[in-house]
Image (spheres, rainbow, N blue to C red):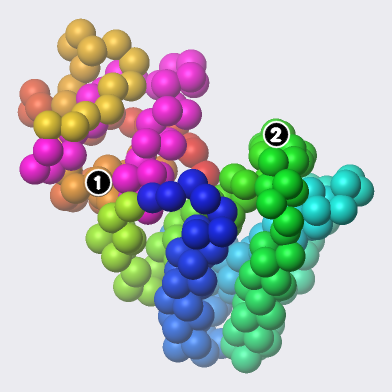
Amino acid sequence: MTTDPLLLTGEVDAATSRLLRAAATFDEADLAAGSLLPGWTRGHVLAHLARNADGFVNLLTAARTGEPRPMYDSPAGRVAAIEAGADRPAAAHLDDLRRSADRFADAAAAMPAEAWTVTVETPGGPRVAAELVWCRLREVEVHHLDLAAGHRPADWPETFAHRLLHEVATDLVDRPGVPSMVLRFDGSRHELLIGERGGAPVVAGPAPDLAAWLIGRGGADRLTVTPDGPLPNPPEWM
């Protein structure tokens, strides 16, 4: 997958269209049902995705104008906004999701080339603005899974799944206490090592399912472990 934010916006648009089609099928009962995220309904997930889009608009605007602007006013304010939006009618959710996605697309389109190189402060630390389009794509694709509405890891574009898998594996290498493992893609000799190779189990399967499993979104039923035994227990990631 490209790292060019201008090209990645097309991937965001496509992922957003898939998300909107799913959201358009929900009624109030569907939105009140639980998601894959503990304590969150589907309404919470959609409210989060809308406010996340607006948060990225804040960061892109900061990069473009040079005026510091936080992604969210505060952690408490972020939580409050999600809670306030979770119980809205289905039509209000869908309208908010569409409008916030359009605001993100407009903010990305307004970025001059030099603004993409500006570093902005995100809740997870500093990031170059060019990385924000990937971050939004990741939010949309992963949280679409969290809606528990039939979207599966296998439905992710292959390039997205591979990039997510490499990103998560790289991140876990630097975390203390992560169990050692070798991740091997089905039908490929390519593998990723986390921790020490000696004695590490080999976890093999399709790249989308490996990525989903590493971030706690299922996929384990399509993975194998060698030598035979339980899957390692990776830490919470996103």
Dot 1 crowding, Cα within 10 Å, few <14, some 14–19, many 20+: many
Residue carrying label 1: 207
Residue nearest the viewer, comparing 5 with 78: 5
Q: Which mark is residue 184?
A: none
The percent position of residue 202, horizontal first and vertical second, equals: 16, 26
Q: Quadrant of residue 226?
A: top left
Inspect the image, locate mark 2, and give the three-letter code of the amino acid beneath it: Gly
Name the one closer to the observer, 51 or 156.
156
Position of residue 163 relative to residue 126, above or below, is: below
Q: Per the image, is 180 magenta?
A: yes
Which element type, helix, strand or loop, lies under badge 1? helix
Question: Is the residue under label 1 in contact with that under label 2 (CB below 8 Å)?
Answer: no
Seen in the image, is 130 located left or right of residue 2? right
Which span of residues is magenta-colored? 160-188
In this rendering, the answer to whether 178 lies above or below 212 is above
Q: Which residue is mark 2?
A: 125
Q: Residue at horizontal 49%, vertical 38%?
A: 237
Q: Nearer the viewer, residue 232 or 215?
A: 215
Report which quarter residue 180 is drawn in. top left
2 or 1: tag closer to the N-terminus: 2
Residue drawn at (29%, 11%) of the image: 196
Inspect this view and state whether residue 79 appears. Answer: no
